[in-house]
Structure formats: C-alpha cells, structure tokens
Amino acid sequence: MLWCRAMIDGCSPSSQFTGEKLLCIRGERVVFTQLNFSIASGEALLLLGPNGSGKSSLLRLMAGLLKAASGQLSWNGLPVLEDREAHAGRIHYVGHHDAIKPVLSVLENLRFWARLHDGAAGDKTAWAALETLGLDRLADVPGKLLSAGQKRRLNLARLLAAPAPLWLLDEPTVALDRASVKVLEGVIAQHRAAGGMVVLSTHADIDLPEAGALHLDEFSAPADAMLGVWS
Amino acid sequence: MSRLLEIVRRDLRLALRQGSDSVMVVTFFVLTVILFPFGIGPEANILERVSPGVLWVTALLASMLSLDRLFQADYEDGSLELLALTPTALEVLVIGKVIAHWLTTGLPLMIAAPVLAVLLHMNGEGFIALLVTMLLGTPTLSLIGAMGAALVLGARRGGVLLSLLVLPLYIPVLIFGVGAIDAVVQGLEDGAQLLVLGGILLAALPLAPLAAAAALRQALE
C-alpha cells in the first residue's frame, strides 16, 4: 500500500529499538528488573505474562510516558530520552483508552490525531485507514454513537492515518470481533513487510508469524530483592 | 505551529458542540454581578464606587469555574496520553489549549463586562480601562488556571483544591486590574498599572505552560 512505501522511504532502511537492564518501579513495588529486549525492522515482539506482570508498564515505558528507574532505551544506539519529540514521532501508542471525543465525528476524530502526528497528513490516507478498518460508512457518525468495538477500530485507524515505524499496542484485540482481529493481523503483517516494528501485549489469540515472545514474569523481582531496594 | 492551531480548532469545535462551559461561565458572571445591586442597594454612587472591584472579582470566580474541565476530559478519555506522545513539545499543546480556553471563557467575559458596568453605574471613562484591563488580565487568568488545573489532575475533589491553589495567584491581576480602572475614574494616569498587568501576562506566557506541561507529565506517570 502507498502509506507503507512512504514510510519506508522516510526512515532508515533498518532500525533497531533496544532496552537494556530496565528496572520499573510502580508505587513501592518492583514490577520488573534486569529486562532486556531488542527489536529490529520487520520484527514483532509479543509481551506475555499474567495480570500485573508489567506488560502495560513496559509499553508505556517504551512510549516514553513512564521513566525507567534505571536502564536505557535506545533507538539505533541513541538514547531515546535525549529527544522525546523525535521518539514521539516514531511511535504509535494504543493504550486502554480509545481517546475518542463523543461530539466529534469519526472522520474528525481520526483527522485530528493524524494531523497532530504528521502535520502533512491528508484526508486521503485518513479515508484509506477508515476503509481498511471498515469504518468508512460511519465517517460522519459522532463518536458517542460508536460501539466499543467500533471505537477500538477507530483508535487503530490512527496507526494507518499517519505513518510511524514503531507500533506499541496494549491489548489491541479487546472488544474486537473475529473479523476485525483478522483485519488487524493483516494490517500488522503489512506494516512489518514494509519494515515496521510492532510490540504487542495480549491475552487473546493473535496470529503473528515469527514474532519474538517476552515472558514478563521471568523478570519479576523475588520478594527479598524488593526489600533490598527499599530497606 | 500547525499543530497548535489544530488543537485550538479542536477545542473550539468541542466547546461549540458541547456549548455548556462558555454559556455557564458568562451566565454565572452576569447573575452574580446582578446580585450586587440587590445586596447593597441601588444608590448610584455606592455602586459606582464598587463597580471595578465587583466586576473583576466576579470575573475571577467565573473564569475559575471552567478550569477543572480544561484537562480533565482529555485525561479521562486517554487523549492526554496521546497528546503527550505527539512530536511537538507538550508546552506548545498546552498553549493551544489555553488559547482555546481564553477564546471560550475570557473573551465572552470581556464582552459581557461593559454591559454589566452600565448596570453598576460605572463612570463612562472607566469603560475603556475596563476593556483594556480585561484584555490584558483574562489571558493571565487562563494561563495561571491551566497550571492549577494540570496540578490537581487525578486528585479527588480537584475542584476545591484548584480554587485554593489558583485564587491566591490571581490576586496581583485583581489588584492591578481594579487599580487601573480606579485611576482612570479618578482622573489619574493608568499607565503604570496597565504596564504591570502586561508584565504579568508576559511572565505567565512562558512560565505557566512550562509548569503545566511538567505537571501533566507527572499526572500521566
């Protein structure tokens, strides 16, 4: 697709996003420690683990919403925190909330986020994104009338409306029906084929061929280590 | 820059479609000012004497009413996270939100103020000064208010806390706003007070967005 090609031209042919010795503390609890990961262009990383094992925290950390207590995140070897805005331009983050304004129409919601991410984003890509996710017939419907699944699809449409090499998806399949999950799998496959990267956490089945897996419970701190930090 | 305009446009569109906030602020302003002639009697000279103070104090309270919604809605529906993750400094986006807030609250207050000044028998010479002080003062109220609104984000009973935080910071604007009008009404120069008001605005313009953005980042952690 066009947007994929445009994206690959815009960034270096092969990028690398890595985290080294990450330590994440929420409240007074060590969520994970000594966590390393590495993902390159075209790859996908699946975050696995029980509730509370830090999947969302790791995704927020990768996005730059959270700061790691120690350790380093780098993009092509350069620390991410040195230039927050440049990093923000490289990523798309899909969290638990869909960020949809009830009084704006589907198209207005999408166009706002697309333009905010990429000042030059045009209506054509927004329409194409809506079409891919099966929302084009709802373009004029206000956000408050959408079902949970439709809201989630609109949130996912942001991924296509403005290109970014790294997608951070926190349980993207929640509220989606089977057919929409299939569409999402296709979209992710296309993104990877065009050199994009995807980090994804999920409890549902999703088909990501050759995706790396990161089991977060392997990095949880033992009880005495917690005392070691806080006593 | 285009992103700043984009966010101003979105917030204006939201305000127009939801409608409630602007209307509520102006209605509160008008109703409260109308209470004063009932409360202190219809004597023109007393009303005239208190009119600058009444108008400014009521304007402060009115502009505070809408503050707790400034970031709250975006915080609750997840928009704020995405705003923090756009390739523009969060400070710039805060300025965009403040501009939209001023256009939907400060500007209507400024337009309503002269009408209410007539009701309070304000001396005709004070009208221009009232408008100029409102023009210089209300943007400062939005800026300081944004800082407060960002700080109380996520706190329970944020509304009460917000007024405790923000009202003391509004005092300089009140003093110099009323001072300028009083000076003109008494036939004196109001230049010094207006310069101070302008100075406060110029200081708040970079500082408040910086503080607000830092507070927002904290709230998102």
Image (spheres, grey):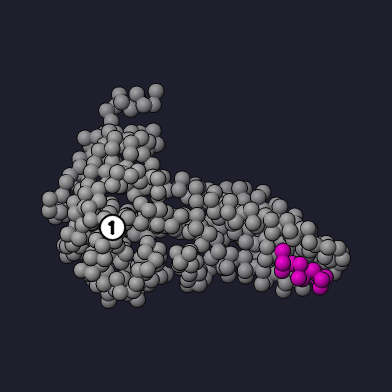
> Which quarter of the picture shows residue A228?
top left
Which secondary structure, mark 1? loop
Near-viewer residue (B192 or B46): B192
Near-viewer residue (B62 or B79): B79
Q: Where is residue A170 in the image (x, y as percent from the top left)?
A: 28, 51
Looking at the rendering, the stretch of residues picked out in magenta corresponds to B121-133
Q: Is residue B167 left or right of residue A48?
A: right
Q: Crowding at label 1, few (<14), some or many (≥20) Cα neighbours within 10 Å?
A: some
Q: Report the quarter where the C terminus of chain A lies.
A: top left
Q: Where is residue B154 in the image (x, y as percent from the top left)?
A: 47, 48
Q: Amino acid type of disc 1?
A: Cys
Asked if residue B127 is among those painted magenta in the image, a careful observer would answer yes
Q: Report the quarter where the N terminus of chain A lies.
A: bottom left
Asked if residue B139 is among those painted magenta in the image, a careful observer would answer no
Looking at the image, which residue is at 32% across and 55% down?
A90
Residue under label 1, please give it: A11
Prevalent SS, magenta region: helix
Q: Where is residue B155 in the image (x, y as percent from the top left)?
A: 49, 47
